[in-house]
Image (spheres, helix red, strand yellow):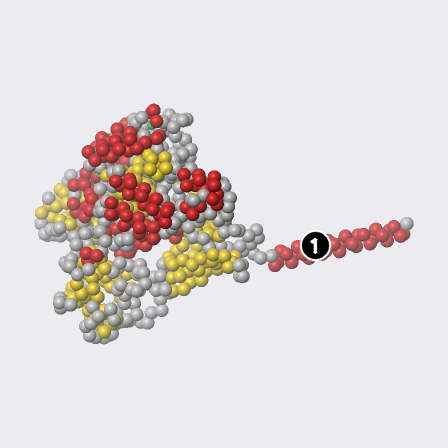
C-alpha cells in the first residue's frame, strides 16, 4: 500500500516537473519570440527632397511579400514592394519624399494591412483600424542672413539644379512669354533682377515662400532663345550664373522657350463630360447582355442595365444643349464586366455596346456635333480572357506568350493572389509585361489604331504602375499619328514626374479636387491655405500641363459630388464657379449636372434618369450657364492666374484671369452673411458685368463696390 502511494507521489512529481518545464518554455517563448518591428531612416538630398528608408521586420507567420501603401501612392497595395534582406530578416524600401505628413501601412502578401507599431503617432484609418503617421520635417541648418549686410548666402540659391527638381524654374506663359524663377534665402537680398546678356534687366518679385526660402519670379516678354544671369543687390552687386555666385558677369544660363513642351490648344476651349457607357443610355435593347435589369435599378458590382454607344449617340442633343464639347468614355472594348477594365479584345468594341459599327457611327455624329472623344486605355493589365493569357493558361511554359506576363511560378492558374503579377491581387486582371518588346508593340498598335478610327486621345488607367519608359514611347507614337491627341493619366498623387513633357499632357486632377472639397465643402481650409495649395501645384508644374489638367469633381472612382457636398447646393454652386473659371479642363461626370447622388462604386455608377422630374433642374441650368460663360470667355480659357485678394476672416477669395490685355475677375465668398467689398481693378473707369447675375458695376477711381451674399460667386468682365 505504502509502495503504491510512493509510486503515485513519483508520478505527481514527474507531472509537476513537466508542467514547470512547459511554463518556463512558454515564458521564454513569449519573451524572446521575434516581434514585428519597423524603422524609418531619413537622408537629406536637398532641403525639399529626402530619401526615406522604410524598414519592416514581420513576425511569424512570415509573409512572402511586403508592400508599402500610403498617401504617397494613393494606398496602392502593390505598387511599392519592399525588398527582402535574408541575412537581416527584414524588408525595406526607399522613397524620395518631400517634407510633409504621410499616413501609411505595410501590406503583407497584398492582403493583410498592418500599421507600424513602433511609431509614436497614429490615427484612425476610417475602417476601425489605425494608420501610422510619419511627419517628414525639413532639415534646414541655416546660417543667419541679413538684408543690406553686403553679402548674399550662396547656400540656398537654386536655379535649374543638377538633380531633378520639385520646382519649375524655366517656363513659358500661355501667351508665349518666358518665366524665370530663382530660389534664395528669405531676408537676405534687397533686390533681385534677371540680367540679360544684352544688358537689359527685369526686376523679380517674391511669389512663394517655403521652409525659409523665397521664390523670385519674373515674366519676360521674350519668346526667342536668350542668355541671362541673376543680379542680386545687397549692399554690393552679385551675379548668379552657371558657375555660382560671383562679383563678375559670366557663366550665363541659356533658355529656349520654344523647347518647353506644349499641350493641345483645343483643350483650352474644352469642357469634358465623362460617361460610364453601361449606365448612360440604352439606345438599342437588341444588344443587351443576358440578364439585363430594368433601367434605373440599383447597381451591384456585377449587374447590367444595357447602356451602349447608340444611347450616347441618340442623346448628343442633350449634351450639346448642356454645352460640353468633349466626351471621355470609360472602357468600351470587349470584356466580361460592366466596367470593362478587364479587356478581352483591344481591337473590338464590346458587342453589348454596339460593336465597332456603333463606334463608327458615334464618331461620325461627334464630328458633326464638333465634339471630341477620349477613350480609356487600360494597358497595365489585360483581362484573363485576353488571347495571350488564354494561350498561356493552356500551354504554360510552352506558350510563346509566356513573356507577355510576369509569371513567378508555373503552372499559371487563375485565382486570387496568384503566382503571377496582377492588379491588386485580382487573378482575372493579369499585369501585362510592358517591358517586353512584343507587348509594347502590340499596345502601341492599339493606341494608334483607335486614334486613326477617330478617337482624339487617351485617358490612361493606373499609369503609375507602368514604367515611364513605356509612356515615353506611347507619347511619341500617339503624337506622331495625331499631334493634338490629348493624353492624360489617372494619377492620384503628385503628378509632376509624368508632366515634364515626355509623357502626359495632364492628369485626372484628383489633388485639385481634394483641395476644392476641403475648401468649399468641408471648409477645413482658409482662403489663404486654399490659395497656397493651388499655388504649390502651379509652381511645381509647367504651365502647359496646368492648362491640360483634367479638373474633375466626380468620376467613376469617387463619391458623387452632390453626396460629398451633402446636398448643400449653395456651396456646390460656388465650387462650380471656381471649377469653370480656373485654368485646366473642367470635366463633369455624367449625371452630376442633374444632382445624381451616390457613394463610391457601385453607387456612383447608377443609370442616368432620363425622366426630367428626377433632375435638379436648377442645378443643371447653372451648369449650362457656367459652361456657356467658360466657352465664350477667352480670358477664362487661356488667361493667366493671379491672386488678387484673400480675406480669411471674411471667407473671400478673388483672383484674376488675363489674356491679351483683357482681365476677368472671379470673386468667391465662402461663408454666410453679407460682405461688402471694395475691389481694386485694373481699369481706372468703366463698367464690369457679373456674368452670373447679369448685374453691372461702375468703376470709380480704379475701384468697384460689391456686396456679396452667402456663398455668392461673381465673374466680372469689363464691358
Ligand atoms: Ca544679405
Ligand atoms: Ca443596349
Q: In the rendered image, is residue 123 in sight?
A: no
Residue at 33% in and 34% down: 349
Q: In the rendered image, is residue 251 in sight?
A: yes
Q: Position of residue 471 (x, y in %)?
A: 32, 50
Quadrant the C terminus occupies: top left
Whether residue 118 is situated above or below residue 270 in the rendered picture: below
Q: Which quadrant of the view contains residue 443? A: top left
Residue at 28% in and 27% down: 612
* SS under mark 1: helix
Would you say the beta carbon of the disc 1 residue lies within 8 angstroms of ligand 2? no
Q: Position of residue 168 (x, y in %)?
A: 26, 58
Q: Position of residue 201 (x, y in %)?
A: 15, 66
Q: Dot 1 surroundings within 10 Å: few (below 14), some, or many (20 or more)?
A: few
Q: Position of residue 290 (x, y in %)?
A: 40, 26
Left or right, residue 615 beside residue 427: left
Residue linked to disc 1: 22
Residue at 23% in and 40% down: 271
Q: Residue furthest right?
A: 1
Residue at 82% in and 54% down: 10
Q: Residue furthest left?
A: 685
Left or right, residue 326 beside residue 434: left
Q: Residue furthest top?
A: 286
Whether residue 548 is situated above or below residue 257 in the rendered picture: above
Between residues 154 and 447, which one lies in front from this camera angle? 447
Amino acid at each position: 500500500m505504502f509502495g503504491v502511494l510512493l509510486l503515485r507521489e513519483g508520478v505527481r512529481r514527474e507531472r509537476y516537473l513537466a508542467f514547470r518545464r512547459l511554463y518556463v518554455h512558454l515564458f521564454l517563448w513569449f519573451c524572446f519570440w521575434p516581434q514585428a518591428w519597423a524603422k524609418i531612416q531619413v537622408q537629406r538630398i536637398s532641403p525639399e527632397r529626402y530619401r526615406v528608408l522604410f524598414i519592416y521586420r514581420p513576425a511569424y507567420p512570415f509573409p512572402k511579400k511586403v508592400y508599402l501603401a500610403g498617401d504617397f501612392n494613393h494606398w496602392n497595395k502593390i505598387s511599392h514592394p519592399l525588398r527582402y534582406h535574408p541575412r537581416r530578416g527584414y524588408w525595406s524600401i526607399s522613397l524620395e519624399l518631400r517634407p510633409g505628413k504621410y499616413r501609411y501601412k505595410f501590406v503583407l502578401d497584398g492582403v493583410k494591412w498592418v500599421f507600424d507599431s513602433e511609431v509614436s503617432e497614429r490615427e484612425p484609418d476610417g475602417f476601425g483600424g489605425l494608420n501610422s503617421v510619419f511627419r517628414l520635417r525639413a532639415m534646414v541648418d541655416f546660417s543667419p542672413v541679413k538684408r543690406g549686410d553686403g553679402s548674399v548666402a550662396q547656400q540656398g540659391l537654386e536655379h535649374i539644379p543638377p538633380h531633378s527638381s520639385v520646382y519649375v524654374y524655366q517656363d513659358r506663359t500661355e501667351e508665349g512669354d518666358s518665366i524665370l524663377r530663382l530660389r534664395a534665402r528669405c531676408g537676405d537680398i534687397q533686390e533681385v533682377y534677371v540680367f540679360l546678356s544684352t544688358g537689359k534687366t527685369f526686376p523679380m518679385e517674391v511669389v512663394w515662400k517655403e521652409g525659409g526660402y523665397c521664390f523670385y519670379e519674373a515674366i519676360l516678354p521674350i519668346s526667342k532663345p536668350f542668355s541671362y544671369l541673376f543680379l542680386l543687390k545687397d549692399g554690393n552687386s552679385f551675379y548668379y550664373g552657371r558657375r555660382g555666385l560671383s562679383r563678375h558677369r559670366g557663366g550665363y544660363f541659356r533658355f529656349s522657350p520654344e523647347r518647353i513642351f506644349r499641350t493641345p490648344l483645343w483643350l483650352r476651349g474644352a469642357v469634358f463630360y465623362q460617361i460610364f457607357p453601361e449606365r448612360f443610355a440604352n439606345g438599342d435593347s437588341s444588344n443587351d447582355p443576358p440578364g439585363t435589369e430594368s433601367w434605373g435599378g440599383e447597381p451591384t458590382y456585377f449587374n447590367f442595365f444595357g447602356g451602349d454607344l447608340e444611347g450616347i449617340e441618340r442623346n448628343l442633343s442633350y449634351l450639346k444643349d448642356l454645352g460640353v464639347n468633349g466626351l471621355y468614355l470609360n472602357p468600351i472594348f470587349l470584356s466580361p464586366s460592366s466596367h470593362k477594365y478587364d479587356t478581352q479584345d483591344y481591337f473590338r468594341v464590346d458587342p453589348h455596346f454596339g460593336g465597332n459599327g456603333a463606334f463608327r457611327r458615334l464618331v461620325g455624329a461627334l464630328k458633326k456635333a464638333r465634339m471630341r472623344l477620349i477613350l480609356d486605355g487600360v494597358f497595365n493589365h489585360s483581362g484573363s480572357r485576353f488571347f495571350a493569357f488564354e494561350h498561356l493558361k493552356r500551354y504554360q511554359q510552352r506558350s510563346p506568350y509566356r513573356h507577355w506576363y510576369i509569371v513567378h511560378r508555373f503552372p499559371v492558374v487563375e485565382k486570387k493572389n496568384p503566382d503571377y503579377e496582377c492588379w491588386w491581387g485580382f487573378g482575372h486582371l493579369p499585369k501585362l509585361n510592358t517591358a517586353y518588346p512584343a507587348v509594347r508593340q502590340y499596345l502601341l498598335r492599339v493606341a494608334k489604331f483607335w486614334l486613326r478610327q477617330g478617337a482624339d486621345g487617351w485617358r490612361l488607367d493606373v499609369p503609375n504602375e507602368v514604367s515611364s519608359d513605356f509612356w515615353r514611347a506611347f507619347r511619341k507614337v500617339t503624337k506622331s499619328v495625331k499631334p493634338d491627341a490629348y493624353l492624360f493619366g489617372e494619377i492620384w498623387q503628385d503628378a509632376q514626374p509624368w508632366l515634364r513633357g515626355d509623357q502626359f499632357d495632364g492628369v485626372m486632377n484628383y489633388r485639385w479636387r481634394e483641395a476644392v472639397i476641403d475648401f468649399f465643402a468641408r471648409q477645413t481650409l482658409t482662403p489663404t491655405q486654399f490659395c497656397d495649395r493651388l499655388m504649390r501645384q502651379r509652381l511645381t508644374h509647367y504651365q502647359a500641363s496646368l492648362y491640360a489638367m483634367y479638373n474633375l469633381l466626380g468620376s467613376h472612382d469617387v463619391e458623387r459630388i452632390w453626396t460629398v457636398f451633402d446636398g448643400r447646393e449653395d456651396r456646390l454652386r460656388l465650387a462650380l464657379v471656381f471649377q469653370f473659371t480656373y485654368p485646366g479642363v473642367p470635366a463633369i461626370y455624367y449625371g452630376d449636372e442633374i444632382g445624381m447622388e451616390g457613394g463610391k462604386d457601385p453607387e456612383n455608377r447608377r443609370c442616368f434618369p432620363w425622366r426630367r422630374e428626377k433632375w435638379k433642374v436648377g442645378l443643371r441650368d447653372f451648369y449650362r450657364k457656367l459652361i456657356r460663360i467658360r466657352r465664350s470667355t477667352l480670358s477664362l480659357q487661356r488667361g493667366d492666374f493671379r491672386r488678387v485678394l484673400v480675406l480669411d476672416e471674411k471667407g473671400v477669395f478673388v483672383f484674376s484671369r488675363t489674356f491679351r490685355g483683357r482681365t476677368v475677375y472671379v470673386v468667391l465668398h465662402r461663408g454666410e452673411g453679407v460682405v461688402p467689398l471694395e475691389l481694386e481693378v485694373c481699369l481706372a473707369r468703366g463698367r464690369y458685368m457679373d456674368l452670373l447675375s447679369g448685374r453691372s458695376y461702375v468703376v470709380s477711381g480704379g475701384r468697384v463696390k460689391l456686396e456679396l451674399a452667402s456663398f455668392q460667386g461673381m465673374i466680372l468682365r469689363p464691358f
